[in-house]
Every structure is written in C-alpha cells, then in structure tokens.
C-alpha cells in the first residue's frame, strides 16, 4: 500500500515538473492478493451492461438478447419478458441498460441494442419499457431512437447510455466501421447524441439551427465509444472510445465539438497501415483527448468511483477487453495523474464496470461463461 502511494505521488510530481497534461503514464499493477474478488455470478452469455435497481439488485444484459435480474447473492433470474428482438451478430446484440432518473415512480428501463434493417445493415437503437413490480417483464416497450441510416455490417455500435443531472439522455454511437461518417453531420454514426427522456430533441442542442446537420448530435468525430459516464462532482458527461490499433481515448463530451476521428488519431489500421484520412495525432479544429493509450487496451464501460474506499477517491475505472484487466485512472480535476491496472492475473476480457451502492466495483467479463465480479481492496 505504501509502495503504491509513493509511486502515485512520484508520477504526480514528475507530471507537474514536465507540464505534460495529456501524456500517457506508465501504469502500476495492483497485486491480486491486495484485492477481494468475489464471483457473484457465472455462466452469463457475453454480459454487456449493468444497472443497479433501487433495492441493490442488478439488471444485466447478455449480448445474445436476454435481460436478467441478479441479486446480491448471485441468483440469476430468468430472462425478463417483453425485451425486443435484437440483432445478435458480430459486435451487435442487446447492449446497454440504464434506469430512468425517475425510476422509483415510473419504473422505466432503457435498453440500447443492435437492429437489422431490410438491407441487412445494422444500427444502434434505444427503446424503453416499464419494469413490472416483480421485475419479470417489460411492458409497453417503445423505440425512442434509431441510428439511421444503418451502416454497420456487424461492427462499432457504441451504445453506452447515461442520463445527466437535468434528465437528458446521452447515447454514444459507434461509426459502424464507416470512418468518414463520424465527420458527417447529416449522419448519426460516430456521435454522442442528446435527447429528452422520451426521445424528442432538446431545442438547445448545438446543431438545431443548422439545416445540414442532425439535430440529435451533441458531439461528433467519435470512433467506437463504449464508455459514457457522468462526473460525480462536475456533472459533465465523459466518454471513452476504442481507437483502431492504438489511440484509445478518454474525452469530455462538450456540445458541438469535434473529437477528431478519423482526422486525428494516435492509432493506425490493424494492417499496420496509416488511417487514410488521418492528418496526425493532433489536428487543429479537433479536440485532443484528456487521455489516450498508444497501445489499445480496448476500453469499454467506464465508471467514476463514488464510494468510500479511500485509495479509490477521485478515480475513474474502465473495463478493458484486449489488455484483459480493469484500468483505474487517478484524476486531479481533468488531468490524469496516475494509471493503475487491476485484475491483471485473471486475464479476462472486461466489458463493463460499475460502482455499486455498497461502494464496491462490479465487473462484467466478456465471455460465453461471462462473470459478474465484485471487487474491493482488502
Ligand atoms: Ca479523438
């Protein structure tokens, strides 16, 4: 413990001296024996998203299309009825789940998922339904948002959701692996959109006065954002996204701003070739990330830490698929001062992380025998 704190302190000092705010830091690794890791549930089919109900039970999505309740003892419920049919193909399927800000009264559950169109192309869809009192069925499910036109052949749906303090719904949308669409303001690929809770468009969205732009758009130039979270102190929306080969990013999602993809990226194509549209890692007129990784961990779900664990204060966690661990960044305002890797020895792909009402970290692993883990320092 003392060793870790010293390293963190050293990193902070060296950052201050060099004045490099956005540089990638050398991560420290948390030893497994310093953590308590409980396998709350196993046997989940590629679980993707998790939302805590007010009674501390959890709603968990499985990519193949099931929404289930899991209680704190790990009892996994039958699939909840009334969930729409999803296109479970490639990276598509049943993806994120969030509760309405007024859930205690309206019992509304929002689902993000992939849908197939008539031409077999796929896109991200968000809908909502009312969860029955015994949590076994959704009723009156209605689609409130569709990523149209659909461009995906199975990749890059994004699909994380978050409500802000004013009750606006933000949805992170992948570019469907059609790079240039992320810069097209007449398309919904590679964007974060902002909607009212019923799916209507807020009148003060940044592009509502522009004829050539979709009114839903809040930010653009994202690649495949799979993390979206509300900063607990500032209330700002933060996003995270997969780069190509290299160039995973953490960004603020500020209205009307261009987050660069594919013009600006620290990554290259999987083939080893340069991204054709890329002009560099930093391009004028685009927002640099708050933090980026030159070697992609493939970061997915993100969660700011809001519990009482002292050494996790001022932190944001990410699940990482390729590096098979959990990443914790220490923040000083918007500056990342340290990076730490947890659950490294387990070597499991991590899809989502959430902070429970008990202050522990809940982790979904991405596997046909997917697990829900509960993690806390010893
Ligand atoms: Ca970017």
Image (tube, rainbow, N blue to C red):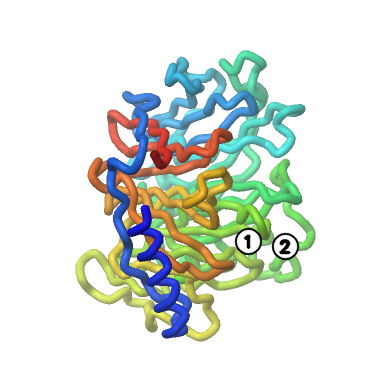
Residue 224 vertical position relative to residue 292 in the rendered view, above or below: above
Name the residue nearer the viewer: 159 or 189: 159
Outermost residue toward the left in this view: 271
Query: Which image quarter: residue 76?
Result: top left
Of 227 and 86, the residue lying toward us: 227
Q: Secondary structure at mark 2?
A: loop
> Which of 9 and 29 lies nearest the eye of the viewer?
9
Count of numbered tags: 2
Label 2 – label 1 distance at C-alpha: 7 Å
Residue 127, by quadrant, is top right
Taking 34 as reference, is 85 above or below it?
Answer: above
Residue at the (28%, 43%) spot, across then down:
32
Label 1: state its secondary structure.
strand
Q: Position of residue 287 (x, y in %)?
A: 53, 76
The answer to whether marks 2 and 1 mark residues whose Cβ atoms lie closer than 8 Å is: yes
**Which quarter of the rendering shows the C terminus?**
top left
Look at 35% across and 34% down and name the residue there: 37
Check the image and report above or below for 11 versus 93.
Answer: below
Image coordinates for residue 49, horizontal then vertical, percent: 47, 38
Left or right of 251: which side holds 166?
A: right
Quarter occupied by residue 373: top left
Residue corresponding to mark 2: 205
The residue that appears at 60% across and 72% down in the rendered structure is 257
Between discs 2 and 1, the one toward the N terminus? 2
Q: Is residue 284 visible?
A: yes
In the picture, the disc for residue 217 is 1
Query: Who's the residue at 55% across and 72% down the image?
Result: 258
Mark 1 surroundings: few (<14), some (14-19) or many (≥20) residues within 10 A: many
As drawn, the label of residue 59 is: none
Q: Residues within 10 Å of mark 2 (few under 14, many from 20)?
A: some
């Amino acid at each position: 413990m003392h060793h870790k704190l010293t390293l963190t302190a050293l990193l902070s000092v060296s950052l201050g001296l060099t004045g490099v705010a956005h540089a990638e830091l050398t991560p420290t690794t948390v030893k497994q024996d310093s953590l308590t890791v409980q396998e709350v549930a196993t046997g989940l089919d590629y679980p993707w998203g998790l939302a805590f109900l007010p009674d501390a039970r959890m709603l968990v999505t499985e990519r193949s299309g099931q929404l289930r309740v899991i209680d704190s003892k790990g009892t996994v419920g039958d699939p909840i009825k009334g969930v729409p049919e999803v296109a479970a193909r490639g990276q598509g399927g049943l993806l994120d789940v969030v509760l309405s800000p007024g859930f205690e009264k309206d019992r509304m559950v929002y689902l993000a998922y992939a849908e197939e169109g008539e031409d077999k192309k796929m896109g991200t869809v968000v809908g909502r339904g009312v969860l029955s009192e015994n949590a076994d069925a959704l009723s009156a499910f209605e689609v409130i948002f569709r990523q149209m036109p659909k461009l995906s052949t199975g990749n890059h749906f994004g699909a994380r959701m978050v409500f802000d303090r004013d009750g606006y719904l933000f949805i992170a949308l992948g570019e469907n692996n059609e790079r240039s669409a992320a810069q097209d303001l007449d398309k919904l690929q590679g964007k974060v959109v902002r909607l009212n809770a019923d799916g209507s468009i807020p009148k003060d969205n940044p592009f509502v006065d522009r004829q050539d732009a979709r009114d839903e758009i809040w930010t653009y130039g994202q690649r495949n954002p799979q993390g979206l979270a509300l900063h607990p102190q500032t209330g700002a929306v933060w996003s995270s996204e997969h780069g190509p080969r290299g160039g995973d990013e953490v960004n603020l999602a500020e209205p009307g701003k261009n987050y660069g993809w594919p013009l600006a990226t620290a990554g290259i194509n999987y083939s080893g070739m340069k991204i054709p549209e890329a002009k560099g890692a930093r391009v004028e007129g685009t927002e640099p990330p708050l933090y980026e990784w030159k070697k992609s961990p493939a970061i997915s779900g993100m969660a700011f830490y809001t519990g009482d664990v002292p050494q996790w204060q001022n932190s944001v966690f990410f699940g990482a698929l390729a590096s098979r661990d959990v990443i914790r960044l220490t923040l000083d305002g918007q500056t990342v001062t340290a990076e730490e890797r947890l659950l490294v020895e387990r070597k499991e792909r991590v899809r989502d992380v959430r902070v429970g009402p008990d202050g522990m970290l809940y982790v979904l692993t991405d596997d046909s025998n997917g697990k829900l883990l509960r993690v806390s320092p010893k």
